[in-house]
Structure formats: C-alpha cells, structure tokens
Image: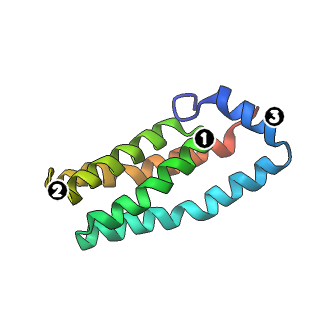
Amino acid sequence: MSELIDPDFLNELIDFMGDSYDDIKRVYIDSTPLYLLAIDEGFAEGDAQKIFNAAHPFASSSGNLGLVILKNRAAALERLSKDVVDGAVHFDALSEHVGALRPLYESSVSALNAFNS
C-alpha cells in the first residue's frame, strides 16, 4: 500500500480535514470514473485533446489524496497526450499509459479505502 499512497501526506490530510476527509474521499471516488471514461473514449476516438482534458484533473485530484503513483501515471499521460496534440508524438504512444491507468486506479482506490491512519 505504501507504494501506492504517500502515508505521511494522507495522515496530514486526515488530521487537517477531520470529519471532512470522508467527504473528500467519497467525492474523489464518485467523480474520477468520469475522467477514466473520458480518457477511454478519447483513446477509442483517437482524440488526444480529450485525453489531455481528462488526464489533467485526474492527476491533480489523485495527487490531492496522496495517490502518488496514480498521479504520476496520469500526469505522464497528460504530458504525452499534449505532445500528441502538438504533433511531436504519434497517437499510438498513448496506448500503454491508457491501458495501465484503470487497473492502477482500482488498486489505488482499494489501498485508499484500506488506509488506516
């Protein structure tokens, strides 16, 4: 779990937010599947801009909960999709990142739900 979550960061967040932490976690878990759906749709449609638009808030919100590996993977997808939009990289380069995102998300959410401060 410690490799998926930054425990020090998450403990500080829980201490700071108190009872509101559960609400923040719930909002994250409820809203992030929409980003994953947009990323998957963008990939299926060959739309790197759509992937970029979803990867940015996905990375940010994941980082806000200390999900460091997920944040880093989503941020890498964000940068790479921007490179595709700019014509510097071929669209196929996104495949590995897009394919790895959902399983990593599921593992990260499981670790987040199992986390005990």
Amino acid type of the residue tagged 1 in the rendering: Ala
Residue appearing at x 44%, y 54% in the figure = 56
Nearer to the camera, 67 or 54: 54
Nearer to the camera, 12 or 96: 12
- Give the x, y percent position of residue 9: 66, 30
Amino acid type of the residue tagged 2 in the rendering: Asp
Residue 15, numbered circle: 3
Residue 1, above or below 21: above
Badge 1 element: helix
Q: Residues within 10 Å of mark 1 (few under 14, many from 20)?
A: some
- Give the x, y percent position of residue 42: 32, 68
- The answer to whether marks 3 and 1 mark residues whose Cβ atoms lie closer than 8 Å is no
Of marks 3 and 1, which one's residue comes earlier in the chain?
3
Q: Within the image, what quadrant is residue 51 found in?
A: bottom left
Badge 2 element: helix
Q: Which residue in the protein does label 2 denote?
A: 92
Badge 3 element: helix
- Give the x, y percent position of residue 83: 23, 51
Label 2 – label 1 distance at C-alpha: 30 Å
Amino acid type of the residue tagged 3 in the rendering: Asp
Residue 4, above or below 82: above
Residue appearing at x 52%, y 45% in the figure = 107
Q: Nearer the viewer, mark 2 or mark 1?
A: 2
Look at the image and tell me in which quarter the N terminus lies: top right
Of marks 2 and 1, which one's residue comes earlier in the chain?
2
Residue 111, numbered circle: 1
Q: Is residue 13 left or right of residue 65?
A: right
Q: Residues within 10 Å of mark 2 (few under 14, many from 20)?
A: few
